[in-house]
Image (tube, helix red, strand yellow):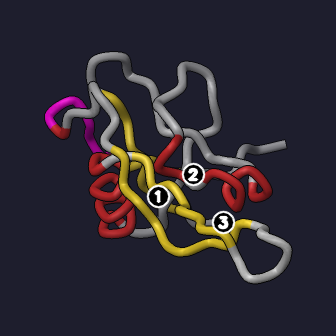
Amino acid sequence: MEPIKVYAIRQISTGWFMPATAPQRHRQRGYTRDEPTERCVPRLFLQRKYAKLALRAWLKGAWIETHAPGDYHGQLEPTGMEIVPVEGRKSEDMEIVQLIIVEAAT
């Protein structure tokens, strides 16, 4: 099997990676609320440009869904997204690294 090249986002100062978020958690919170984690499965990208886009969105801050009262019994309904800056996120402390996945011999 051919090696697969993938990309991950790593914090330079700690060596920690942005984690791969569980699908159900991603739907509830989104990747922009995650922080680099010491012991995690890294979030992987098939192309460097996708890692750059994800990093750019993360550096802007946490993307939070906004709500307003709806017509049906006053329940809240989603109205859009708001970007909330997160202190300490610095582009100069983040990098995109290439990883190579190879199948181990059994």
| Nearer-the-camera pick, 77 or 60 | 77
Residue 1: assigned label:
3
Disc 1 residue type (three-letter):
Val
Residue 105 location (% of width, % of height)? 76, 44
Cα separation between marks 3 and 2 = 10 Å
Q: Which residues are magenta?
A: 92-96
Cα separation between marks 1 and 3 = 15 Å
- Mark 2 sits on what residue? 101
**Residue 19, quarter of picture:** top right
Q: In the rendered image, which quarter contains the N terminus?
A: bottom right
Depicted 75 relative to depicted 38: above or below = below
Q: Could one spot residue 61 in this view of the protein?
A: yes
- Tags 1 and 3 in contact by the CB under 8 Å rule? no
Q: Mark 1, mark 3: which one is toward the viewer?
A: 1
Residue lying furthest left in this view? 92
Is residue 21 a member of the stretch shown in magenta?
no
- Tags 1 and 2 in contact by the CB under 8 Å rule? yes
Q: Give the mark, 1 or 2, whose residue is nearer the N terminus.
A: 1
- Mark 1 sits on what residue? 6
